[in-house]
Amino acid sequence: MTIKRNRKIEDEKERDDMTMNRQQKKEYGKKKDEMNRQRWFENLAKGIEENNLPWQKPWVGGGGAIPTNLKSKKAYRGGNVITLWVYGMGEGWTDLRFGTRKQLIDAGLSVKGLSNGTGIPIKYFKTGTYEKENKDGETEIRTSFLTRWYEVWCVEQCENYEAPVVEPHDVVAESVMMEQFYQYIDSQSSLDLKRKGNRAYYSSNDDDIVLPPHEAFTDSLGEVMTAMHEAVHSTGYKTRMNRALGNKFGSPEYAFEELIAELGALIVTLSLGGEFKPNAVMEENANNVAYLQSWLKACREQDKALDKAFSDAQKAADYILDALRGDEE
């Protein structure tokens, strides 16, 4: 009896120790996530506050303009795209391929000097399912959401990096990009395009995109970028993605939607192989940047709001691209 009792006590102590270790690991993971989250948020915030934004640099699609993973060769998405763009601009990188230390080593690249804690933090999201018994004793299938932070480095940071030979490619002409825009309009049952006046905007009340006449634009690229900007706004319509539209000019909500439209237009344009330059809306109204800065200041302690803006921009871009792919089928 004494032996069994002692063994039981030891087993319970071992379980307590295991539980404590798991709890400690969980707390450690939370602290690491928080540290990485702060680095991620502050880096993006700095880009907005210093007026050094991804959409203020000309990009050309089709030639590695969208950051990709070195191993999978898949493009990063959402906030990760913006994070890597901001870092890339700050460092002057032109080869926007990124990988973990292991991925860099597997590719034959040197990781000398690339120690843990010096990389760029990116988020990885994964969903899964698990079984849980409810209060009635029935087994339910529930969904779990897993967020993990990883550090990646640009291939140009490796000391034995050699720039690859990149085949020249043709930028998709502005006229073709406008045709893509018209195709998107036609793919949406209630959406209409009107050419009038000297302002570009999206009306959520009428589900109309309003653009000035073609001849009113000083260059064709400005017309493309303005059109794509308004197209992203239109994805927020109640029968599409149902975002909050029609907010007061200058409000944090207005700035939030402008951020979605600018980033979404950037992703769409580059994904279609076009050239991206700062939107005429942003160039002609410098106050928009000030609105983004004031909104960012208000939500500095609410990083999920900024995270949501990037997520919504990616979803809006996907909506337009999926609509165009549907037309091709």
Image (cartoon, grey):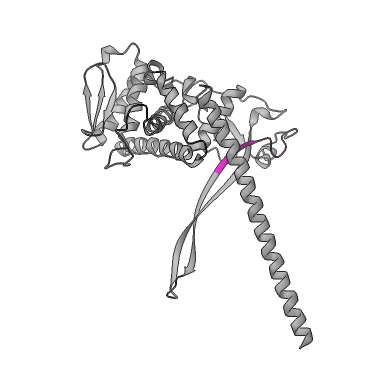
Any part of residue 75 in sight? no
**Is residue 306 part of the magenta span, yes or no?**
no
* For residue 3, above or below residue 39: below
Any part of residue 42 in sight? yes
State the image coordinates of residue 192 (x, y, percent, origin top left). 22, 30
**Is residue 118 part of the magenta span, yes or no?**
yes
State the image coordinates of residue 25 (x, y, percent, origin top left). 67, 55
Farthest-out residue, front: 298
265 sits left or right of 157 in the view:
left
Q: How many marks?
A: 0
State the image coordinates of residue 168 (x, y, percent, origin top left). 51, 20
Quadrant location of the N terminus in the rendered image: bottom right
Q: Quadrant of residue 261?
A: top left
State the image coordinates of residue 6 (x, y, percent, origin top left). 77, 80
Residue nearest the observer in this picture, 10 or 170: 10
Farthest-out residue, right: 3
The residue lying at 33 percent from left, 38 percent from top is 244
Farthest-out residue, bottom: 1
The residue lying at 65 percent from left, 27 percent from top is 156
The residue lying at 68 percent from left, 42 percent from top is 102
For the magenta stretch, what is the residue range? 115-123
Residue nearest the observer in this picture, 312 or 71: 312
* For residue 149, above or below residue 160: below
* For residue 183, above or below residue 28: above
Quadrant location of the C terminus in the rendered image: top left
